Every structure is written in structure tokens, then in C-alpha cells.
């Protein structure tokens, strides 16, 4: 007997738990909301029915998504990442795009996997990305499989030499110009938009802003790199790439993985409320990205390409 999609358990971004709260001499039991952390398996599928009509990629994770499997298609698992459920299709698309596995024209459809061999609890934790081409791309990444966590991003991510082959330096002297006063206001605007963080206190966020400081989109996740993937996937699936006029702000620090993902999306200004890593600075300087760190309390450091900061 097959199970309908409506009967399948679907994890949410937060999970309820009972905790023992201790404050001074007062001890009481109460409910707490935790940030959900669950695995997401990302699969690639190459449709052999190249000439047939295919649906456009969806921009939301609605339960009305089409089935991912078609008999005769080639399938392969590319990555398993720990993430906060929500915007899973964007996460899969953004991850694959940021790692150079797909281009915008490659994407045919994205859906949760409903294969009968999957346990019921895993079906909303498995996403299949179907490509328009008739075979899977031959990439070294597919042979070793990406293994990621919510803490550190992709283990063994592409080095600078690989980025040089697929990413051009960002145009210098043109595009975004952002004033310090605008930068000062971004952390508060990002925090105000973090709906799940307000419940759990345990999520990172990535926000896209205009040079005037207007919030365009925000995504939350237990991993900063996942939040950035969700933003890049949103931009890819809504045909907004490259993001040449955007400013990216991430909670926490800027790592190499975050700078790499921003570069692949064409984002010229990347900010973080904490410090950047040494390799993130090296990447930013080589590719002409403006990298801002310690953006808090009306101060910040500029580590590369300061010409995009409109200082007096």
C-alpha cells in the first residue's frame, strides 16, 4: 500500500523540547524551541527524455511538488548536508551552482524524492535535482561525493586554482557603492528578519541587501554556508543571477566557503558581523571582492577592494 504525501512526516525549522530551567534558586520545567538539524541528501538525475516538456524549477518547497523519479533516468547522490529544514530546493540548487556542478540552464526540476525504497521519515530529507541534459556531468566532485556539516561547510571544497578556471574577477570600479552609515544598519535589519532565530536563538542568517540598505531576501539555517546556498538558489531559480548590485551579510564569520559561494553568484560586497578567515581574505583580494568584517556597533574593517565603500 503506497503512502500519500500528506501522510509523510515533514520536519519543520524548529522542534519542541521539554527542559529543566534553573535560575538562581528557582527550578522549573518548561517548553523550549530548538533549531531543527536534520540531514539533506542531494541527488542529481539526468533525464533521458531530453525532448519532452519539463516543468520549470519551483521556488518554494510546497507539498504539491512533482515526483522526482522517472524510469530510465540516471541518478547519483552528490552531497549529504546537515541543515535546518525549509527552502530545501533553494539549498540544493544553490549548493550545486556554487560548487560549479550546474549552471542556470541545466536545471529542469527539483522535487522531494518519493522512491518506495526510502524510509518514510527520509522522504522530506532527500531532494532530487533533475538536469535537462541526458547524462550526469563528469566531475571529480561526483566521484568523491561532497560531505558537509552545519558547522564547517564542504570538506575539501574547491581550491583557488579551481575557482580561477570557472570564476572571473569581479569588475573593478563599477557597480555597488555603499556608505558606512548604510552598513551600520544592516545587522539590525538582518536580525529583525530572523523569524526562526527569535523562537530558538540557535540559527545563523544570510541576507541580501541593496546598496541603499533595503533587505531583498533572508534565509536562516544552522549553518551559515547553508543560508548562503539558500539565497543563491533563490536567485538562480528566480533568474536573478548574477547578483552584481547586491550586498551579502552573514551572521558570524566569513569563511572561504561563504566567499566562494558569493563569488560564484557575482556578489561584489560580502560582510560579516565577526572576523573573516585568512583564506576568505585571500580569495577576496584575488577576485576583487569587497570583504567587510566585524560589522557591529557602528564600526567595521575592510579587508579588500575598499573602493566600493563610499568613505569621505
Image: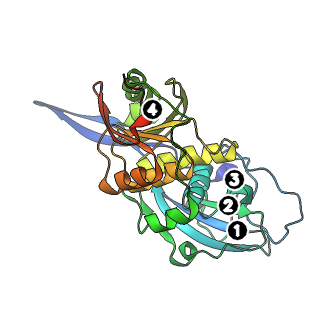
Residue found at x 38% / y 29% = 187
Q: Nearer the viewer, mark 3 or mark 2?
A: 2
Q: Is residue 12 left or right of residue 54?
A: left
For the residue pair 50 and 161, the one nearer the viewer reads as 161
For the residue pair 176 and 297, the one nearer the viewer reads as 176
Residue holding disc 2: 129
Q: Position of residue 179 (x, y in %)?
A: 43, 24
Q: Nearer the viewer, mark 3 or mark 4?
A: 4
Q: Position of residue 49 (x, y in %)?
A: 85, 69
Q: Earlier in the sequence, mark 1 or mark 3?
A: 3
For the residue pair 45 and 182, the one nearer the viewer reads as 182
- Which mark is on residue 194? 4
Residue holding disc 3: 5
Residue 108 drawn above or below residue 50: above
Residue found at x 55% / y 78% = 143
Residue holding disc 1: 45
- Badge 4 local density, few (<14 within 10 Å), some, or many (20+)? some
Quadrant position of residue 304: top left
The local secondary structure at tag 2 comes to strand
Q: Earlier in the sequence, mark 4 or mark 1?
A: 1
Residue found at x 53% / y 47% = 170
Residue 224 drawn above or below residue 123: above
Q: Is residue 270 left or right of residue 103?
A: left
Structural distance between the alpha carbons of marks 3 and 4? 29 Å
- Badge 3 local density, few (<14 within 10 Å), some, or many (20+)? some
- Badge 2 local density, few (<14 within 10 Å), some, or many (20+)? many
Q: Quadrant of the N terminus?
A: bottom right
Q: Nearer the viewer, mark 1 or mark 3?
A: 1
Amino acid at each position: 500500500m503506497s503512502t500519500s504525501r500528506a501522510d509523510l512526516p515533514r520536519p519543520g525549522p524548529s522542534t519542541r523540547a521539554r527542559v529543566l530551567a534553573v535560575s538562581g534558586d528557582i527550578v522549573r520545567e518548561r517548553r523550549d524551541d530548538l533549531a531543527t538539524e536534520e540531514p539533506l541528501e542531494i541527488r542529481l538525475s539526468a533525464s533521458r527524455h531530453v525532448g519532452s516538456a519539463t516543468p520549470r524549477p519551483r521556488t518554494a518547497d510546497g507539498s504539491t511538488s512533482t515526483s522526482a523519479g522517472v524510469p530510465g533516468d540516471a541518478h547519483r547522490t552528490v552531497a549529504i548536508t546537515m541543515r535546518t529544514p525549509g527552502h530545501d530546493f533553494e539549498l540544493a540548487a544553490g549548493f550545486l551552482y556554487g560548487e560549479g556542478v550546474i549552471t542556470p540552464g541545466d536545471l529542469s526540476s527539483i522535487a522531494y524524492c518519493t522512491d518506495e525504497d526510502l524510509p518514510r521519515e527520509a522522504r522530506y530529507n532527500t531532494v532530487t535535482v533533475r538536469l535537462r541534459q541526458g547524462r550526469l556531468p563528469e566531475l571529480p566532485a561526483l566521484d568523491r561525493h561532497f560531505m558537509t556539516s552545519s558547522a564547517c561547510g564542504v570538506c575539501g571544497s574547491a581550491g583557488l586554482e579551481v575557482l580561477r578556471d570557472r570564476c572571473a574577477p569581479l569588475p573593478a570600479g563599477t557597480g555597488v557603492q555603499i556608505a558606512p552609515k548604510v552598513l551600520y544598519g544592516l545587522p539590525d535589519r538582518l536580525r529583525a528578519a530572523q523569524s526562526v532565530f527569535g523562537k530558538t536563538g540557535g540559527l545563523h542568517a544570510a541576507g541580501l541587501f541593496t546598496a541603499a540598505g533595503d533587505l531583498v531576501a533572508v534565509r536562516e539555517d544552522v549553518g551559515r554556508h547553508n543560508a548562503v546556498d539558500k539565497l543563491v538558489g533563490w536567485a538562480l531559480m528566480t533568474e536573478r543571477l548574477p547578483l552584481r548590485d547586491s550586498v551579502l551579510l552573514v551572521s558570524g564569520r566569513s569563511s572561504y566557503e561563504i566567499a566562494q559561494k558569493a563569488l560564484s553568484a557575482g556578489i561584489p560586497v560580502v560582510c560579516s558581523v565577526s572576523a573573516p578567515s585568512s583564506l576568505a581574505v585571500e580569495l577576496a583580494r584575488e577576485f576583487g571582492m569587497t570583504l567587510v568584517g566585524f560589522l557591529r556597533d557602528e564600526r567595521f574593517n575592510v579587508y579588500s577592494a575598499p573602493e566600493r565603500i563610499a568613505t569621505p
